[in-house]
Image (cartoon, rainbow, N blue to C red):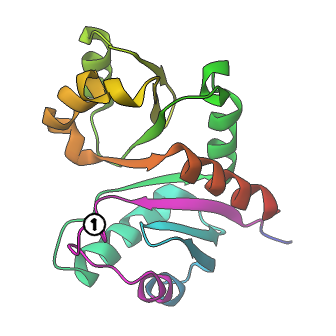
């Protein structure tokens, strides 16, 4: 009996930013390969790692957590999403996501994050020249006008929230490129 392998995207938070928390993508790929993950590859240097596994995510999340904890001397929160979940999330996006916006960001929920904090923040926020969609695995945030960016809730309040250290952000173009890579790998 053939066991099906599932494809995943591992999104690391806060690495290789401003010369801090350096993580070599090739070293990380090798760590994952040595730990038994298959078909490991990365996209750009910001912590986007693809891999396949025949196990379900609940069984290997502790392994990834251990690898990151023992392999690096700094904390690395991460989000883990299956290919199917990622592409379903993308398919469910509202029309405005594909419109011309000054900025588009995706704020992925890292493992261990209490999402209720995020939802409370969104519910209580007043938005200025921006729009937000709450997805299953992330917030999708659009800003309409670059010249008004400094007045947005995104800029003025988001980074002050306790949960901010437990989300990992990708811009809209990176989000779309990851989806393309996942679609190519059948």
Instruction: Name the side, left or right, on which 124 lies relative to 160.
Output: right
Residue placed farthest to the right in the image?
1
Up/down of 124 relative to 26, above or below: above
Residue 5, magenta (yes or no):
yes
The residue lying at 24 percent from left, 81 percent from top is 70
Q: Which residue is mark 1?
A: 17
Given residues 171 and 151, the one toward you in this image is: 151
**Residue 74: x, y in percent?**
17, 72
In which quadrant is the C terminus drawn?
A: bottom right
Secondary structure state at the residue bearing disc 1: loop
Question: Where is residue 157 drawn, in percent x and y?
Answer: 18, 27
Quarter of the picture holding the N terminus = bottom right
**Which span of residues is magenta-colored?**
4-30
Rendering coords of residue 23 (x, y %):
33, 79
Badge 1 density bin: few <14, some 14–19, many ≥20, Cα 10 Å: few
Determine which quarter of the picture holds residue 162: top left
For image coordinates 67% across by 62% down, the residue present is: 7
Q: Residue 180 is drawn in which quadrant? A: bottom right
Task: Choose between 12 and 146: the one closer to the eye.
Answer: 146
- 104 left or right of 72 in image: right
In the displayed structure image, the side of residue 8 where residue 69 appears, left or right: left
Instruction: Give yes or no for residue 54 being in the magenta stretch.
Output: no
**Residue 129 horizontal/vertical position (percent):** 39, 15
Q: How many marks?
A: 1
Q: Is residue 77 left or right of residue 132?
A: left
Residue 103 in view in this figure: yes
Residue at x-position 27% and y-position 34%: 114
Question: Measured along the vertical axis of the image, is residue 166 above or below residue 26?
Answer: above
Between 119 and 151, which is closer to the camera in this rendering? Answer: 151
């Amino acid at each position: 009996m053939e066991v099906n392998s599932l494809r995943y995207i591992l999104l690391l938070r806060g690495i290789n930013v401003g010369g801090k928390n350096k993580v070599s993508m090739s070293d990380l790929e090798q760590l994952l390969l040595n730990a038994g993950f298959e078909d490991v590859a990365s996209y750009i240097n910001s912590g986007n790692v693809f891999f396949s596994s025949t196990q379900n995510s609940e069984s290997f999340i502790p392994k990834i957590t251990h690898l990151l904890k023992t392999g690096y001397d700094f904390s690395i929160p991460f989000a883990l999403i299956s290919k199917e979940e990622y592409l379903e999330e993308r398919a469910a996006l509202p029309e405005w996501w594909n419109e011309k916006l000054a900025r588009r960001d995706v704020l992925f929920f890292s493992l261990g994050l209490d999402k209720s904090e995020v939802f409370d923040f969104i519910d209580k926020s007043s938005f200025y020249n921006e729009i937000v969609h709450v997805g299953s695995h992330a917030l999708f945030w659009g800003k309409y006008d670059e010249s008004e960016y400094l007045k947005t809730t995104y800029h003025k309040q988001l980074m002050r929230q306790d949960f901010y250290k437990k989300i990992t952000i990708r811009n809209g173009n990176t989000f779309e490129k990851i989806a393309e890579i996942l679609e190519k790998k059948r």
